[in-house]
Image: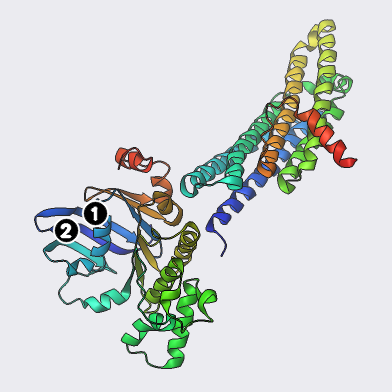
Amino acid sequence: MERHFEQELEKLKKRILKMGDLVGAQVHNSLEALLTCNNELAQQVIGFDTEVDKLDVKIDKLCQRIFALTQPVATDLRLIMSALKINNDLERLGDLAVSISSKIEGISDYKEILAGLKMADLAQMADLIVKDMVNLLNNQNTSMVRDIFLSASAIEDRVNIATGHILEEMMHKSEVIVVATNLTIILTQIERISGLCTNIAESVVFIVDGRMIKHDKTFRGSFVSDNEQKEE
Amino acid sequence: MKQPKIQTRELSLFYGEKMALNSISMDIPEKEVTAFIGPSGCGKSTFLRTLNRMNDLIPFVKITGEVLVDSLNIYDKQIDVVNLRKKIGMVFQKSNPFTKSIYENVAYGPKINGIRERKKLNEIVETSLKNAFIWEEVKDRLYDSAMGLSGGQQQRMCIARALAVEPEIILMDEPASALDPISTAKIEELIFELKKNYTIVIVTHNMQQAARVSDYTAFFYLGELIEFGKTRKIFTTPDNKQTEEYITGRFG
């Protein structure tokens, strides 16, 4: 006899995955719009945000209903607690995609700055970490978490270098200050994208293993050594 | 809300001079589960028993108002109470198997209704036990005494017995309160399945159970209907402060 409760959990999982797919596409399109200075695509991203918001509310309501009506425990409780948090993180990823899209106007006149920042590489890394996060949500294979953390670390390094580069530009060319300020914000937002992906990876670890690794400063190191031990 | 199967109109009930139900008006939807919750003595079981005239058996009871089932007032003089209770089955807190075999327990109602053909009775017994999710557990011992079943099995067999006379409505008065968590979960899943074909009304002290199994919830207090609505609404954002305080355990 299948528990009726299972149907509710399946519905929740499907909605989270749908949210992951939608937000993944939003981030991808916003970065594509940035690199190609495609204002039309940027406007599409901005316009589509209402769909993301609607699904966000739907997932929150479903979680509220499951909490109130089914009193989940153990793995079920972890799943629903985490679903709320993952949903929130995904919605914020969607907001970042919108924010990036709203700042690309005027950048087309300064494509050489984008090239100097190696923005194409950075965008590709951000796109990849989001794809990995969506895959992790889908297959819950926590061995992928290590890669997500390593990617986030690499993105952070690249953002720091690019930020330094852009400050240089601003000091020497006052005419680029407006666009360079927007690019600095975009860089911060790309870093936030990777940060939210690691948050979501932490939530998946909590669902699967029951380990609460957020704020665990030793986690990255221990995780890497765990994996090395396994490989041995 | 779906088409109402049961409607009460300003239904009041008195035990002698004491008012136990005060002008209850409610539409109970067809093929949904409706739960009655409230503290002890609030009138929820009394109200349940008005829905198939079980209170007729209690002396000094006076009832005013109406109970309409499929738009017919069941308290009209021309209503045949035996036929009414065929249409409205009931399951009690304590399972009450007859001291007969499992087969005889389930076949009892159809036999009373004049069904004698063995093949037909076999079909009814099998279908009823299957619909009550107990067939697999008892199919090899149908002629053993029902008293040998566990408490949870006895309760599901009693539900099969209620189903055997093909009711349209099933009233359940604390059907799982005497059962362990696993048997309770089976009864709850059974209720969920049964609502596809039957209108179910359940009284429960267990608020979590009401939340899990029902589509609609009615909260009673001191013989009054305080709030009635969709369960998902009652248990997330009730309109009434008393309902909120009761379901959050602040009083009752």
Image coordinates of residue B39 in percent, x first then y, are: 29, 48
Residue A64 horizontal side relative to residue A171, left or right:
left
Q: Is residue B237 above or below residue B131?
A: above
Q: Is residue A224 above or below residue B243?
A: above
Q: Quadrant of residue B243?
A: top left
Task: In the displayed orientation, state which residue is furthest to the bottom.
Answer: B117
Q: Chain of mark 2?
A: B
Q: Earlier in the sequence, mark 1 or mark 2?
A: 2
**Quadrant location, the C terminus of chain B:** top left
The label shown at residue B252 is none
The label shown at residue B13 is 2
Residue B180 horizontal side relative to residue A214, left or right:
left
- Amino acid at dot 2: Leu
**Quadrant location, the N terminus of chain B:** bottom left
A74 and A56: which is toward the camera: A74
Image coordinates of residue A6 in percent, x first then y, are: 58, 55
Q: Is residue B44 above or below residue B237?
A: below
**Residue with the mark numbered 1:** B43
Residue A159 horizontal side relative to residue A84, left or right:
right
Q: Are marks 1 and 2 on the same chain?
A: yes
Task: In the displayed orientation, state which residue is furthest to the left.
Answer: B17
B151 and B185: which is toward the camera: B151
Circle 1 crowding by C-alpha within 10 Å: few under 14, some 14–19, many from 20? many
User: What residue is at 12 percent from the left and 53 percent from the top?
Assistant: B18
Cα separation between marks 1 and 2: 9 Å
Q: Quadrant of residue B77?
A: bottom left
- Judged from the image, the secondary structure of the residue bearing numbered disc 2 is strand
User: What residue is at 81 percent from the left and 16 percent from the top?
Assistant: A163
Q: Chain of mark 1?
A: B
- Judged from the image, the secondary structure of the residue bearing numbered disc 1 is loop
Q: Are marks 1 and 2 in contact (CB under 8 Å)?
A: yes
- Residue B239 seen: no
